Amino acid sequence: MHGKRVVVIGIGNSGGDIAVESSKFAEQVYMSTRRGAWVIRQVSDNGVPVDMMYNTRFVHILFQLLPINFFNWFGEKKLNGMYDHTTYALKPKHRLFSQIPVINDDLPLKILSGSVVIKSNVKEICGSTVVFDDGSTVEMVDTIVFATGYNYGFPYLPNNVLYKSGHRVGLYKHVFPPNLEHTTLGVVGFIHALGAIMPQAEMQARWVARVFKGLKKLPSNQTMIKAVDKDTKDIEKNYIVSKLTPLQVDFVSYMDDIAGEIGVRPGLPWLFFTDYQLFKHVLWGPVSSYQYRLMGPGKWDGARKAIFTQFDRMYQPLKSRKLEEPESSITGHLVKLSLVILSGGAVAYYFHTHHPNTIPTLLSNIRPQAAWR
């Protein structure tokens, strides 16, 4: 890419990374996008990784209780407060949580410095000239990178085994082909969420291993097909989808769903009454794999300690310079307590007026799932 004029087509995570890295050596990088995108940073408030800050059960509960438009408004306002997506020519046609956002700390700075120029969708390519939908052109292009995603397929499966559900190849809970005569195939990692892929893939692998071992049976083919169709409708309801984006799930919901198949989903009400300190960490802390080692098959005695110390391990490499810390302020604690009480009151009121049956449902699940024997 050194000294070249580069056009990157597509503004997913790969496209963003390619544009940023290419701009360090290229003469000029242009990034073409059809819809635009919301761009979030890997580092969130107070320097905490964004998934450790927001992929928590408390945030997940709020998403179940409050209107999604509230979170769209709040999230978009927060992102635009860092860099206005309209000014940076990034603003998409969809709302923030209608599609998995682009995660890139450096792209806004590259746009601001002029190293990366955002362009509209490509209309045609004429030799070394790229023509865009808005009529603008870029001439003397040396390299075009297509970061437009993948076509997903399973060529090793017979056609009568494949099940098409709307825009996607249907897999039961994104893992098992529902039409296989015998359960001999599980697809691991074929999923997309606003969170790390490895914890999800590990959860899928644990489930697949138990199914292959005969410790867990899958439902009938028809039951699995109905579940696949329901998943497709949920995806179409919650996300902007196409044949290239069939994999979206909610991180916490999906982790808990697969954990339920294994028998390792932690029960919040049960923890509240039996181990309140652990309950607080499970509710407020990041949903990491440790939470699914507290009980059931694969239980690990060190899981509780690992949950309590996961932030310590994150911060430890940063403690390369000793600093004098000021004494904590009583006023600061009181302000934080007041905000928590006000937030809790608002959530409780919304709970009571809009979801009167939710609390009885939560209480009915007060005990954790029984482990498979």
Image: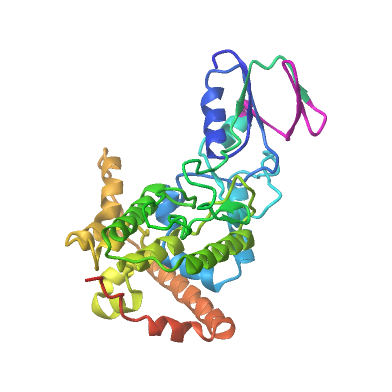
Magenta stretch: residue 1 in it? no
Left or right: 85, with 339 as reference point: right
Image position, residue 64 (x, y; %): 52, 71
Do we see residue 332 in this rendering? Answer: no
Asked where in the image residue 2 lies, by quadrant, the reply is top right
Residue 125 within the magenta-colored segment of the rendering: yes
Residue 187 against residue 271 in the figure, above or below: above
Q: Quick one: which residue is furthest to the left in this view?
A: 301
Q: Nearer the viewer, residue 332 or 194?
A: 194
Image quadrant holding the N terminus, namely top right
The residue at 31%/75% (across/down) is 369
- At 28% from the left and 44% from the top, the residue drawn is 323
* Magenta-drawn segment: 113-136
Relative depth, front residue between 272 and 270:
270
Residue 202 x, y percent position in the rendering: 33, 52
Q: Nearer the viewer, residue 18 or 164?
A: 164
| Relative side of 372 to 127, left or right | left
Picture coordinates of residue 212 (x, y %)? 30, 57
Lateral position of residue 329 relative to residue 192, left or right:
left
Image coordinates of residue 302 in percent, x first then y, are 18, 59
Please name the residue shown 58% across and 52% down the image: 168
82 over 301 or under it: above or below: above
Residue at coordinates 67% horizontally, 38% vertically from top-left?
88
Q: Is residue 10 visible?
A: yes
**Which is nearer the eye, 207 or 158?**
158
Dividing the image into 4 quarters, which one contains the C terminus?
bottom left
